[in-house]
Structure formats: C-alpha cells, structure tokens
Image: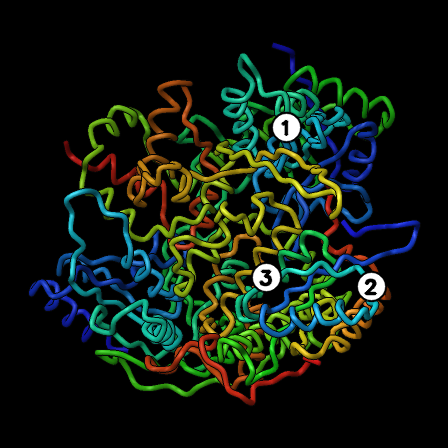
Amino acid sequence: MNLDKAKIEAKKMLSRGEVKYVIGYEIGTYGFRISPSFARTPEEVDKFTLSPLCANNLVTYLKVERSPPLPKGIKPSNLKVALFAKGCDSRAILQLIAEKNLSREDVFIFGVPCTGRIDPKKIEAMFPRVVSKADVVEKDDSYIIMIEGKDHPVPKDKLIFDHCRSCQYPNPLVYDLLLGDEVAAGEDYYDSVVELEKQTLNERWNYWRSHFERCIRCNACRNVCPLCYCDDCILERLKPQWMRRSVNANDNTVYHLTRAYHMAGRCISCGECERVCPMHLPLMKLYKKLEKDVKELFEYTPGLTAEEKPLLTTFKPEDSEEFIK
Amino acid sequence: MSGIFKGAFEPNIIAFLCNWCSYVGADLAGISRIRYPANVKVVRVMCSGRVNPLFVIYALRHGLDGILIAGCHPGDCHYLQGNYIARRRLVLMRRLIEYVGIDPRRLRVSWVSASEGAKFADLVKEMVDEIKKLGPIEQFHENI
Amino acid sequence: MTATEIFTLPKNRMHAFLGALSGYKLYAPVLVEGVLLFDLITDLKKFSCDAALSGNPVKPPKALLFPQTETMFRFNVTRDVDISVGKDNEGERIIFGIHSCDARSFLIFDQVFDRDPSDPYYANRRRKTVIIGIACNIPGANCFCTSVGGGPASKEGLDVLFTDLGDRYVVETVTTRGKVLIKQVRKTNPDLMAECQAVDIQKALELHKSAEEKMPRNIDLDGMPKKLARLSEHQFWSDISSKCIACGICTYLCPTCYCFDIQDEAAPLSANVYKLVGKRVRVWDSCMFPEYTLQASGYNPRPLRIHRIKNRIYHKYKWHPENFKSFACVGCGRCIDFCPVNVDIVEILSKVKAIRD
C-alpha cells in the first residue's frame, strides 16, 4: 500500500487550496484505536496512517459536509473534500451519487484495495486492557500485532471481521488515485443468514427479541452509516410520530426494522453499524438478509455504478409476486 | 388491542385499498349484498403505491392483527406505475418481517379490480379465518 | 462516622454470601453476548461471580436508579382525565459488584436529583438501595478516576467495599447500612466470614495503592474551570469536533449524565369507543443529539457538533464544578472505550491544558 503517494498528493492539494480538507486515518489515543484524521494543512497530512486496524468508513463524513446549518453570513464552501476509501467505502460513494446526494466532482478519492480489517471487539478480547498505542502489519495469512516492542503473530482468520471474509468488492470501484495493487475478492456467502432462515418463526423472534432488548438506542448505528443521511430522520419525527421514544424491546424492534427496511437495496455492507454498537447487536445478520433478498428477487446490487437507478424507484414487469394472490 | 367480543377472538385488520380499483371492488361487494366479516377497517388511499411499507410495522407494533393492501392489477394502475413500485416494496417488507419472526401471513397483498366484488369478499373471509387461527398479535404486547 | 468492620470471605463461599441477602432484590453484572450488564439476579445457580467482577459493566448502574424509560404516571381519558401514579412496590435492593467510580456517580446524581425539592422517582429508589462495591486491582485501559477526585478503592457512595485478594475477599463496611447488612448475613451464616487479620488488611491497602499507581491516564484538572472560560472561542474546538458523529454513546454510557426527555405515549383502548389509555414516560436524552436544543420555531442554539462537544466538556469540567463543587465526571473511561471515532475526553483536556493563553 503506497501511503506516501497519497500523502504527497494530499499535501499538494492542500497547499494549492483545491480541497477543504483531507480525511484519512491516524493512530488513535490508546491501544488498537484508529481515529479519523482531518488534515487542513500539509503538515497535518504526516499524521496519516494505513493499517489493518483502519476500519472506519470515512464516507460518513460526507453527509455532515452536505448540509451543515451555517451561521448567518457564512456561505457554504464550494471546495472539494478528499478522503480515503476502501472497496466498501467506494460503493457508498457510488450509491450516494446514484441517489443524487453527492456529485462526483465534490470528492477526491484515494482508493485503498482492502484485504480485510480487524474487528476491534475480537482484538480487544484477545489482548485486553492494552494502554500503549499498538500497531499491526499484515504478513501473508497473519497479522503481526506489535505491543510495547513485542511482536505477536495471530492468524488473520481469528481477528478479521466476519463480513470482510465474504467481501465481493475489496477494490475501490471509483477512485482518483489508487494506492496499491488490486486484491482478490472473498467468497460470497450468507451463512449466518441462511442459518437463521432455517429456524422456526418462534425461534427467530426469540433470537431477535433477545438482542433488541439490549439496544440502548444510542443511534450510533444510524449516525455512522454513510447512507443514513436524512436531515429529518423518520425515527425522530414527532409529527407524525412513527416510533416512540421509550426504550424497550417493542420499540427497539421498530427502530431496527425501520432502519433495515430503509437500507434495503442501499446497504453496502461496510459493517460499521455492527462495529460501533456498544451492546454487540448482530446487526449485519439483519442487513445481510435484505442484501441477499434484493439480489435474489431483483438481481440488484447497490453501489456498483453511479448511473444505476435506486432499487425502489424502478420496477420490472416480471418482478416477483411471490405471495400476492 | 384486538377486540374480544363474547369470549371469541375477533381480529382487527386494517385494509389499504386504492381509490380506483380495490376500493370500488369493495364497494361493489357491498352493493351486491355479499356478506363478509366486519373485522376489516378500510383506509382509502389514492394508489397502492402510496402505501408506505412502514405502515405494516406501525400497525403490528400498535396491536393490529393483520394488514391487507389491495391495489389494481399490474398494468392497470390508474397512475401507471404505482402498483409496480408497491409490489417491490411489499415483497421486501414481507420477507423482512418473516425473518424477524413475525408471521408473514399477517401481511396480505392482493390485486382486486373494480369489478371483483366477490373476490374482495372472499379475500377478506380467507384472511379473517387465517388470522383467527394465528391468534391475536402478542409479540408487541403493550404494557400500558 | 461509624467505625468500619472488616471481615474476610473465601471466594468459594461467595454464593452463600449472596444467598444470605434475603429480603433484597439483587442486581449484579452478568455477561450477555460478550457485554457486561447489570441485571436482576433471580437464579443464583446461574450467576457467575467471576464473570460479574471481570470488568466494568458497559451500561452504567445509573440505569438502576434512573431507568432509561420510567413511567411517571398513567392516564385514562374518557370524558375526564384520570391520572394514576404508580404504587410504590419497589422493594429493598442491593447493587453488587459496582466499581468505586460508578458509586461516586450516585453522589453526583444526588446533587441534582435529591436536593430540595427532590425527584420522587429517583429518591424512592435511592433510599432503598444498598451498594456493595468491588475495589479495582487493575484499572481499565482508559481509567482516570484519580484525576477527578476518586480512586480505585474509594469508599464514597459505597455501603460495603470488597477487595479481591486472590482466593478471598476483604469485606469492609463503610456506612451504618453496610454494617446492618453484614450483621444480617453473619447472623444467619455465622461461620461464613471471619474477622479480617491485620496482614490481609495490609494486603488490601497495598493493592489499592498499586492500583492507583497503575492508573493509565492522568490529567491535572486544577484550574480547568477558569482555563475553559478563557478558551471559549479557540480554534482547537473545531479541530476536535470534526470527527464526532453525534450519536449518544458517550452520554448514554456515562454514569453521571442525567439529561432526560418527557413524552406521552398513548393508544386507543378500543377501535370503536373514544377511550385513550397511556402513560407519561421519562426517557434518557443526549445533549449530543442535534434535536436536543431544537426549538419549536426551528431555531437551534447548538446546531453544529462543535457547539455540542464544547457544551459537554464545559458542563462536566466547568459549570457543574462551579455550581456543585465536583466534576461531573468520575473517570470511568467508558466514553473513551466506546466512542466509535475515538473522541478522547482525556486527550481533549490535555490539549486544553497545553494551550498557551
């Protein structure tokens, strides 16, 4: 991965005033943390890093860019934003362009071919209470975890996100500058979804209920999602009120079903929602189900081109009528 | 919230009928004096494409036992495409609620034209029978 | 100040100890899907003490005194409106396995909810809760309790303090309530706990001291309120707020955050008759949400994340201490542990300190 190429280009763009800022990753404040990094001057670009720990989907920051409420007298800036995008992130950008929420000219993309990212929950379970800043490099099929001068090799399989294993689009589908060689895609499977589908209705209800009960409605899954960009989110509207503010298993179910449905045909499986959830809700199992159904029923995959019409704005006369009598 | 009259379970079903076809069809059933159960509460919408699929979740959350959505036959929509869009949406919604463990038979979608009064009546009879067997929706039990 | 009584309890008799707490509802941490949460313990056989004391529960124990959703009253609307406040059927309870930082958070809640007039929902539960804490021998990766006036074995807010000595616990009563509780246990199980030997007391004190020294994060907050007052328009606030995604994790998992919203929720009782039944609920709210300060006119005094992050830091480290003489922070580190984008409050405070002005 040629991070230096990106840094040189980023510094050039900033010194020429072509971009408002460059969004990258920097080493976090402790342990295995990575922090999104906003470089507004060429010097700040030196902080950038790229490692298997860099899981954040930076495309989510484009939505706060799109419609900030500005104080009086300040005009919105026309400058571009530059950011790093992995395969899944680039799909989010294409989906945003397809939904007319973003123009291609508004963003400069450093494409990062991705061989999978480390699940922070897994690495923190394996190495608990690490305070000093650690680093990770990838070597063949292992990750070398470097903590306080000692190297710990761990098989990739033990630390990688589950959804990274079945990633079909690890290479950015849109970019201005590609930072490395293209990598092979994973094998597409929906094992965890199929497993749940095999269970009975009651078993599934109990499964989901036991998880939704734990949800604290922090809204992190919604806020971190690059494709949840509505200013007036249906889950917060009071006139009319679609969802009650009470936090209990019933209303949490409504929250997650609503969000899952709104993501049908739009979710690009970056897995951020599951990464950020403090209560360990298995959200990818829910979103992957709709991704599978959309593929099966309508042969549609979101985020592949900028010209594709969004799923629910079109139809085919031969669409499935599987249960309509 | 389901009504319990004289000890037997009477489902509460909400029906979204499109103004140009299915609502007229339901009207025809009435005019033709065809009897069908009174468990269905009708909401007239201009087109089945107007039906926000989240109505289904809202209805289930608030204790309705069944949701019926009826529109024009594909190709005959008064607004040309509304029912095609509705078709895509509702197929996905049904799969989602089934996945989460809600019986998908509580959501029923049908194409009813203006001349199909008898079909509408049969549809309602069938649905009420089915939901009577499923029982009242207790999954979102209200603890008010 | 009551004289403390100190005992030892062998670890393998823990279940017997908990079983002897009859007449109380027991709340302790349980591991659910890899997440440690406080829950009501109904079956001691299924309870694992090791799991319970393996870390700091994710959802803070404020949820036990200040539930995320609390019914204030119910109403019944026909021709008139009938309001009924719930009966007080909250029995005596014990919170077991709480860390010193979280116990101190109750004192901050008291400052806000239990002054005159006091919040009856909170106060009622508070009076009926006995708090048994466990001293931290190994602080978490982001703990900084010592910087905000606490400590890994601080007794503030606790009724009884446990210290883990490996194969046994040192059990120290802190308040009269704690004394009464331990007395009750010793009465029914006289051979369960022995008087603590001086050598064990010494070991416990050494563990407390070493935990303090091992505290991973430290920040000198002396003069912070005044410094913050001078930095209100500084450029650095926009730098640190760029990455915030305005979720609510920091506030919901914070043991001292206490903001709430009130909503009425109702449903028609029957489809045919005009009859509305419902309840008024109090739910947690977060100052990090954009709608928190959104006014009916559409104007929002804190529209941007920079305003809201500033507000949060100022509340915790300037306004609350200026009004109540203690930081509205107990140094548990949850906001740092769980922030999706690594907004680090200790780092922010260090940056504030480092600014030359």
Q: Name the element at disc 1.
A: strand
**Residue A118 x, y percent position in the rendering:** 45, 68
Q: Residues within 10 Å of mark 1 (few under 14, many from 20)?
A: many
Question: In this figure, which residue is indicated by the disc labeled 3?
Answer: A257
What's the CA distance linking mark 2 and mark 3? 31 Å
Name the residue tied to disc 2: B37
Image vertical order of residue C295 relative to residue C319, above or below: below
Confirm or deny contact between disc 2 and disc 3 (CB under 8 A): no
Q: Check the image and name the residue furthest to the top.
A: C1
Give the number of the mark in front: 1 or 3.
3
**Would residue C51 be seen by someone viewing this image from the given angle?**
yes
Viewer-side residue, A272 vs C197: A272
In the image: residue B116, left or right of residue A191 = right
* Amino acid on which disc 1 is placed: Leu
Q: Which mark is residue C161?
A: 1
Q: Amino acid at mark 3?
A: Leu
Query: Image point 38% across, 82% down: which residue?
Result: A308
- The quarter in which the C terminus of chain C is drawn is top left
Q: Residue at x 46, y 34 (%)?
A: C212
Q: Residues within 10 Å of mark 3 (few under 14, many from 20)?
A: many
